Amino acid sequence: MTTATVLLAKGLDQDGLIVEVRGTPFHKTGRTGVADGIEAVQELGLIQVSSYLLGEGRVAAGRDAEARGNIKLALEEPVWNQWHDAFAETNTIVDKKGILGAKGQLYVASFQNGGFFVHDSQRIEDSVQGKSGRSLTSHYTMSLDQKTEVDPFLDAVKRKDTAVLVQKGWMKEGSLYLFNDFNQFDEESSRRGFLSNMPSYAVLRTAESARGNYSGYQSLEIQRNNEDLAIAFGGKGKLGAMLDVAGKLGWEQFGSHHDGYKHENSGRVVVVYYRYGGVYSYNLVKYGGRPVGVAPEALAARAKIVSPIETAVTQEATNGGQGPYRKGVVGVTDYDTMIKILDENKDALSPKNVSGLAGIVHAHLSTRGQ
């Protein structure tokens, strides 16, 4: 049985060729499912996907479906109809030393494309199973160490020292951001191209401020200003684009769930759900997991997208009803179809076309049979 891939991005490059980026979901059941899924992604040399890239995929699926004349086609895409663990964390931490201000102040540290533990499948597994001196908190969340994690992180925020976070493995090298309040993030994320280089970022808010975001599902209009959702999807603009598609699909509400941000030094994996589930920053680390892995080549192809998918659909020929792809440019959802199209077009594939295709090929060849 083939595994349907997850649309993450789609659009035109500067030469008018379609670039489509897809990842592979790794669904693992049982108490260690989250850890097992992360391990599977890493073993294949894939990159685990953040929640803002899942949001980008939802927008691309909606625009593609709308351009084809039926917005409901978006719901056939796994990015809309499945839940996925993101490479992201939401943590409640305490400033016992008063590094940033008052001693004992609770903060919410929200990571995208990084975090204290989301990259460490063994640590998650040991915590769930109570092995190697680790355990989950009484609230079934990951336990964070004050001395080796929380204090160094707060000190890095104070000094704006992203290098320390890379050194400790909490963020990836590249575009790095530390925001010590939501307004800073809101301003920077509104900049055109903020997500272009797949940034790692962390947003720090006081727990009192973060609790102002309702936990549950609310109308789409109210959720446009939800800080938790804006952080998860890469900014208010990106969040709004995703909610626009949700509205066209007939959804009236969207969810955002947290645990109240009351339990100090506790961490949670961010999960992107469908409909009322929305985005969970809750105690789901001990249940089944479904992270999404994408090939590095695919992310390189994503960087070449210069215009959205509706332009691609309206400008390209329909290729006999098989989709708006120029010869040699492939957009598929399963392994067997991919191999068939590749074989039929092998003589026509140019290096330019291959660059947008390599990520899909690599991901499918690596994960066949998963």
Image: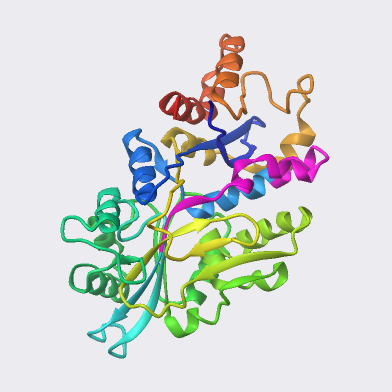
Does residue 158 show up? yes
Residue 334 position in % (x across, y down): 57, 26
110 relative to 87, above or below: below
Q: Is residue 73 highlighted in magenta?
A: yes
Q: Is residue 13 left or right of residue 164?
A: right
In front of the other: 54 or 12:
54
Q: Is residue 318 left or right of residue 156?
A: right
Q: Residue at x 26, y 83 (%)?
A: 99
In front of the other: 354 or 5:
5
Q: Is residue 53 left or right of residue 28?
A: right
Residue 328 position in % (x across, y down): 62, 19
128 relative to 303, above or below: below
Q: Is residue 42 left or right of residue 50?
A: left
Q: Residue at x 25, y 63 (%)?
A: 135
Residue 311 position in % (x across, y down): 74, 40
Q: Which residues are magenta?
A: 62-89
Q: Residue at x 28, y 67 (%)?
A: 143
Residue at the outermost right position: 69
Q: Which colouring convention does the figure follow?
A: rainbow
Residue 47: quarter of image:
top left
Q: Is residue 121 highlighted in magenta?
A: no
